[in-house]
Amino acid sequence: MSSTAEAAPTWHGILRQAFKDQDVRLVTYVPDNVLRPLIDGCHADPFFTTFSCTREEEAVGIVTGACMAGMRGVVLMQTSGFATLPNALASLPVAFQVPVVMVVSERGTMGEFNPGQAIVCRTMRPILDSMGIEHHTMTRLDEAAFVADRTIRQAFATRWPACLIISPLLSGGRK
Amino acid sequence: MTETTGNLHVMNRAALTKRLVAGLKNREAVIGGIGNSNWDLWGAGQRPENFYMLGSMGLAAPIAFGVAIAQPARRVFALEGDGSLLMQLGCLSTIAAQAPKNLAIIVWDNGIYQITGGQSTPAAQARTDIVAIARASGIASAAWAADEAEFDVLVARALTTDGPHVIGVKIDNEPGRNQTDRDPIRFRESFMRAMAEPV
């Protein structure tokens, strides 16, 4: 455990530790306000190679390539960014069975003010389900370490993409 | 190397792909883009270090970039069409920002979406210079190959000097002749095994 996570457990500290425990060293992201503490924490930690991409599918391509060459990676994004991904996921990590791990901060629910975000949010789980991509919504701090660790572990053990959805119940959502 | 598109010899993708692959002696990884880029890579002789993408149009360079990050000691090539690269131009900035020394992107530019019936790309209509886009994105080593000899020189440079490199090639509209098998699990398995071998 990092000293930060020991001092005061946070969802982002727990996720960062889960990445480390599963040797996920490559962190790609398309910026998101809710994910900021996770992104900042990964940037600050030399264990990780962390950088932003211009599109989510670009990040999926990078992580797929890295994973096939022996470096595990994760893609961080928000809900609307996930909605740009179905073709890339179906054609690449799902078809080739490459364990690309995704972390999506959930917008569009529990007090969303933007109608577009609310609509696109409803597409996320059906897309994941239709491709057989295991996903778990993280809502509670006391379950966060278990859910994150086991989901990432299973992705690599079964060579299949997986998705962790960060609920506003856990993150506090967009203020 | 050639800076502009004014005096470029139109070459053949199948012939140049063979030329490229014949010069790879150190288990270099090659990522083939969708359709014809892939098929000519397949036709140039199958090797386990080749990865034959399926339908994720535009992702050959990002996949190659990922391989390059994971294995800094291995040289990695992406073979991408002009239409495909147009779908994912932002990746040039991402690659420029991270500056992987071992990555080269070869862009086969025929100005058309050949596989869907030969419709011209907006870039061809607008006379967009794709190598100039790469350079403006921050990839300093980006040049057109004026002819076969210059292609060889640029590939040699990509194999021996720090990148990232972009090599633009104007090609004819001959379709790829050898379609790949469609067997993604086998491709992934053999590619991963090859990537586990030392360079």
Image (tube, grey):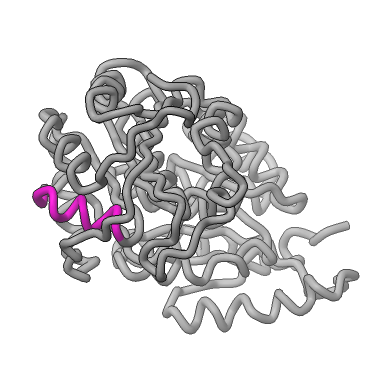
At horizontal 46% and vertical 74% (from top left) the residue drawn is: A134
B101, A68: nearer the viewer: B101
Residue situated in front as seen by the camera: B49 or B167: B167
Q: Residue at x 72, y 51 (%)?
A: A32
Q: Which residue is nearer to you in this view: B172 or B139?
A: B172
Quadrant location of residue B176?
Answer: bottom left
Is residue A156 positioned above or below B65 on the image? Answer: below
User: Does the stretch in magenta take in B13?
Assistant: no
Residue at 48% across / 22% down in the picture?
B3
Q: Position of residue A92 (x, y in %)?
A: 38, 63
Q: Specify the quadrant that holds the C terminus of chain A.
A: bottom right
Q: Quadrant of residue A4?
A: top right
Any magenta on residue B39? yes
> What is the x, y in percent for residue B192?
20, 50
Q: Is residue B9 left or right of residue A143?
A: left
Write the residue at 29% across / 29% down: B147
Q: Report x, y in % for residue A97.
A: 31, 66
Residue A22 appears in view = no
**Nearest the camera: A106 or B151?**
B151
Which secondary structure type mostly characterizes the magenta part of the structure?
helix
In magenta, the rendered stretch is: B36-46
Whether residue B31 is visible here, answered yes or no, is: yes
Q: Residue furthest top?
A: B161
